[in-house]
Amino acid sequence: MDDPNENERFVLLYARHEGRLRRYVAAMVPEAADVDDVLQETAIALLRKFDEYDCNRPFFNWACRFAFYEVMRHRKQAKTRRRQFSDELVESLARQYEQHEQLSKQRRAALATCLRQLADQDRRLVALRYAGDDTIANLAARLGRPASWFYRSLVRIRRLLALCVQKKITAEI
C-alpha cells in the first residue's frame, strides 16, 4: 500500500473501530498484555491486506476475521501458558460476540426510531441532556424549571424509550 491516501484511509477506519475490535479480542484472550499483542498483529495483517478490502462491506466485520485468526495463532504460540481458553470456548465467544453485536445494532436502530416518535419537547429534553456536558441543574435553570422536574421527565422518557425499544425488538423476533 504505497498510496498515502490509502494509508490515511486505513488509519481512519482502524482508529474508528479499534475500541470495538479490542473488546472483541478481549472476549477471547484473558491477559490484557496479550490483547495488545493480538491487536498489534491484527493491525499489521489488516494493513498488509488493506488493498484487498472491499469498501462496500463493513470494515469491522472484515477486521474481526483477521483478529480471530490472530487470536488462534496467538493461542497456538502460547500453549505453554497456564490460563488458556479451550478452542471451543474461543469459537463460542466469537459467535456470541457477533450475536451481541447484531442485537446491539438492532437496539440502536430501534432507539433511533423510538426517539423520532417522542413528542418534540421530550426529544428536546433528551438532546439537551445527552448532547452536551451541562449538568441537569444548569439545564433546568436554563429552562426555568426545577431540577426535580427535569429528573422526573427524564425517568418518564427513559421508560417510554425502553418500552418502545423492547416492543420493536420483540416484534422483529
Image (cartoon, grey):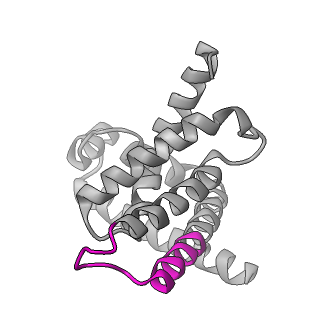
Query: In terms of depth relative to the viewer, which is nearer, 99 or 122?
Result: 99
Tell me if I can see residue 164 in this picture.
Answer: yes
Which residue occupies 63% across, 45% down? 59
From the viewer's perspective, tell me whether residue 158 is left or right of residue 171.
Answer: left
Point 37% across, 64% down: residue: 77
- The residue at 46%/54% (across/down) is 20
Q: Quadrant of residue 33?
A: bottom left
* Residue 172 pos. (x, y %): 74, 78
Question: Residue 50: x, y in percent?
Answer: 64, 35
User: Which residues are drawn in magenta?
Assistant: 78-99
Q: Is residue 168 above or below residue 74?
A: below
Q: In screen coordinates, is 121 left or right of 143?
A: right
Residue 26 quadrant: bottom left
Residue 62 counted in the magenta span: no
Question: Looking at the figure, which quarter contains the N terminus?
Answer: top right
- Front residue of this view, candidates 170 and 153: 170
Q: Would residue 112 be found to the left or right of residue 35 on screen?
A: right
Q: Residue at x 32, y 78 (%)?
A: 84
How many marks can you see?
0
Q: Is residue 78 above or below residue 173?
A: above
Q: Quadrant of the C terminus?
A: bottom right
| Residue 97 is inside the magenta segment | yes
Residue 115 in sight: no
The image position of residue 24, as x and y in percent, is 46, 62
* Camera-nearest residue between 130 and 16: 16
Front in this rendered view, residue 53 or 130 = 53
Q: In the displayed structure, would residue 173 be above or below residue 70?
A: below
Q: Position of residue 108 (x, y in %)?
A: 58, 60
